Image (tube, rainbow, N blue to C red):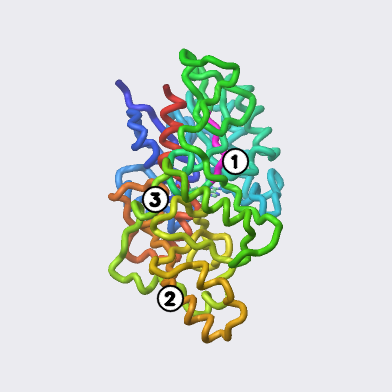
Amino acid sequence: MDLLRVLELYSGIGGMHYALKESSVSAEVVAAVDVNTTANEIYKHNFTNTPLLPKTIEGMTLQDFDKLNFDMILMSPPCQPFTRIGLQGDVTDPRTKSFLYILDLLPRLSKCPQFVLLENVKGFETSAARDALLNTLRQCDYSFQEFLFSPTHLGIPNSRLRYFLIARRPPGCFSFQTSAEIMEGFPRPVSSESSDNPAVPNNHPTPSDSESKSSGPIIFKLETAQELERKRNQDSQETVRRLQEFLREDDDMDQYLLPPKTLLRYALLMDIVQPSSRRSVCFTKGYGHYVEGTGSVLQSCVDVDLESVFKSLELLSDEDKLMQLLRLKLRYFTPREIANLMGFPEDFTFPEHISVKQQYRVLGNSLNIHVVSNLIQLMMS
Ligand SMILES: C[S@@+](CC[C@H](N)C(=O)[O-])C[C@H]1O[C@@H](n2cnc3c(N)ncnc32)[C@H](O)[C@@H]1O
């Protein structure tokens, strides 16, 4: 059988390529396109034989695309125009330009690819860019399904709620009943459907991905009873694996310990987890640099009770505060540990000169490989 020809747009460090490999679909990436020099270096280091085009997507002509003669597009366009914390420039944001360019090209290709998979942030589903995407797909005769999905749905102790769309056009059709609703679980195959609701309830109970603060009296560490209860609930979900399965200590672990200045300034705002926890918050590109909202930190000294450290911390002098906090031995997750949580295989490595900060940055921009691999299989089954 001929290999399926895949075009990987916004390829970054190759999350889509790894997902394709994991899906076991007989395919080859005929071109990967990205403008980021660091990401491209890492991509090339791991996929030496894949043609990598270090250019902007809008710098490629219709003829360039036609020559690649691809059957599938895998893409994760820049998400800043759609994030809740961003300005939500949507289609007016210059970073959406290349995506709109792809939508303009798609109907004009001499051969429309049979499959399209897109990943973006939660928030994309309410954007004008998404409306433009659906219009183009309809115009080109695609069937499609949208999803909001987090690795926690697959039993992975990391929240990374993302929007996904899978699309396919004839010949062939999806093996499940599509729905106009955004699915939050995997659909069941058409043959085993027994109700009007095509989406299968998640195999794994889903710890909430909402990290939003709730109101109410603070119990400790600026957290309310409701927030503490939510975290305890997440930790009791036995179908979700424990973080310790993903931890991998480096030779030089001291570099990951949180420095005193950071501890004193941000201790109350950090999301702290233990190796036995079954949860962690989404790791973003600012991890290891900014503390608030960029990812969880790990309490490596587990004999110390977290609550006892935080209970009356505010009443202490800075010196005593620091003494208390240091007992927890709080550290950042290493890039390898984050890569493990995101499903990168053992053979994925960084070139030696790529700094830890750069590693966090590119990983924060990437995606969960197991989630995408499952969606590729679903799209093609
Ligand atoms: C969300 S990240 C995708 C990450 C990728 N899926 C991965 O696994 O690393 C978006 C990527 O798009 C690239 N990018 C942004 N605008 C681009 C453009 N106009 N042309 C080509 N690449 C672009 C960025 O450099 C970045 O690597």
**Which residue type does callout 3 highlight?**
Arg
Quarter location, residue 254: bottom left
Q: Secondary structure at mark 1?
A: helix
Name the residue beneath numbered marker 1: 99
Q: Which mark is residue 245?
A: none
Q: Is mark 1 within 8 Å of ligand 1?
A: no
Q: Nearer the viewer, residue 73 or 342?
A: 342
Residue at 52% in and 56% down: 284
Q: Residues within 10 Å of mark 2 (few under 14, many from 20)?
A: some
Could you say whether the residue bearing mark 2 is in a helix, strand or loop? Answer: loop
Q: Is residue 193 visible?
A: yes
Q: Is residue 58 visible?
A: no
Residue at 62% over, 49% down: 95
Q: Which residue is mark 3?
A: 242
Is residue 346 found left or right of 283 in the rendered image?
A: left
Q: Position of residue 128 (x, y in %)?
A: 70, 38
Above-or-below relation of 87 to 193: below
Callout 3 environment at 10 Å: few (<14), some (14 to 19), or many (20+)?
Answer: many
Q: Earlier in the sequence, mark 3 or mark 2?
A: 3
Image depth: mark 1 or mark 3 in front: 3
Amino acid marked by disc 1 = Phe
Q: CA distance from mark 1 to mark 3?
A: 38 Å
Left or right: 199 in relation to 336: right
Cα distance between the residues tagged 3 and 2 = 23 Å
**Residue 10 x, y percent position in the rendering:** 49, 45
Spatial distance from mark 1 to mark 2, Cα to Cα? 49 Å
What residue is disc 2 on? 327
Query: Where residue 80 sits in the image (x, y, percent)?
Result: 62, 51
Q: Residue at x 46, y 37 (%)?
A: 204
Task: Give me the residue at 47% from left, 47% from top.
Answer: 236
The answer to which of marks 1 and 2 sits earlier in the sequence is 1
Q: Which residues are magenta?
A: 161-166
